[in-house]
Amino acid sequence: MVVSNLNYAHYNVVFNNIDSVVFMRFKRLFLIVLFSATLMGCAHQGDNSNYFSHLSESNQKKGMRYLLGYGVRQDNQQAFYYFLLGAKEGDALSQNEIAYLYAAGKGTSRSYSKSFYWYKEAAKQGLASAQYNLGLMYQKGLGVKTNVAKAREWYQKSAARGFKPAIVALKQNI
């Protein structure tokens, strides 16, 4: 009787261990397959710079992906390319971003006059951040002759839309 209980206990331990081993192997295999599928999905087009090209995205969103390196390799020149396309299509956000890239010299050579032009295009459409940036350009004389009255005018338009930096600039008696 003692022998049969030991044998039962022994078999119970063996089968539990086998179940654990089989489960662990299955789990490991599942994770390997899942990981492999994930890698194949990420690398199915070679480098990831064109990974999102099949999606129907606006040029502004494509430009932002490249500017920030979101899902693609960060590339200021590609960001510039897509923002310029969007800006020429009349997208205010793209116009604002292309103006920033011109002012910062990212993805293109620095040009305050082109930056001023694109900030003005976006500001005319009511984009508060562009209105503020246009005010800065007038205040600092970047790409345009310094004009404090014009700077204040654009700060006021931006502040009316609730843009906090413009509100601060007006409180500083610009």
Image: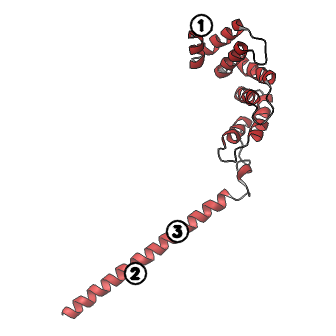
Residue 127 image offset from top left, x and y in percent? 67, 21
Q: Position of residue 31 (x, y in %)?
A: 52, 66
Q: Which residue is mark 3?
A: 30
Residue drawn at 81 percent across, 21 percent down: 113
Which picture quadrant has residue 167? Answer: top right
Identify the disc placed on residue 20: none
Q: Secondary structure at mark 1?
A: loop
How crowded is the residue under tag 1: few (<14 C-alpha within 10 Å), some, or many (20+)? Answer: few
Query: Is residue 75 among what the camera can see?
Result: yes
Residue 156 at what x, y percent from top left? 63, 10
Q: How is the image coloured?
A: secondary structure
User: Quick one: which residue is furthest to the left in this view?
Assistant: 1
* Image point (63%, 15%), residue name: 158
Residue hosting label 1 = 173
Q: In what element is the residue under mark 2?
A: helix
Q: Is label 1 or label 2 in front?
A: 1
User: In the image, is residue 34 above or below residue 109?
Assistant: below
Residues under labels 3 and 1: Cα distance?
65 Å
Q: Which quadrant of the figure contains the N terminus?
A: bottom left
Which amino acid type is marked by label 3? Phe
Quarter of the picture containing the C terminus is: top right
Separation of residues labelled 1 and 2 (CA atoms): 79 Å
The amino acid beneath tag 1 is Asn
Q: Which mark is residue 18?
A: 2
The residue under the point 73% across, 43% down is 75
Q: Earlier in the sequence, mark 3 or mark 2?
A: 2
Q: Is residue 4 left or right of residue 48?
A: left
Mark 3 and mark 1 lie on one chain; the one further toward the N terminus is 3
Q: Residues within 10 Å of mark 2 (few under 14, many from 20)?
A: few
Q: Position of residue 166 (x, y in %)?
A: 60, 16
Decide: is 172 above or below 6: above
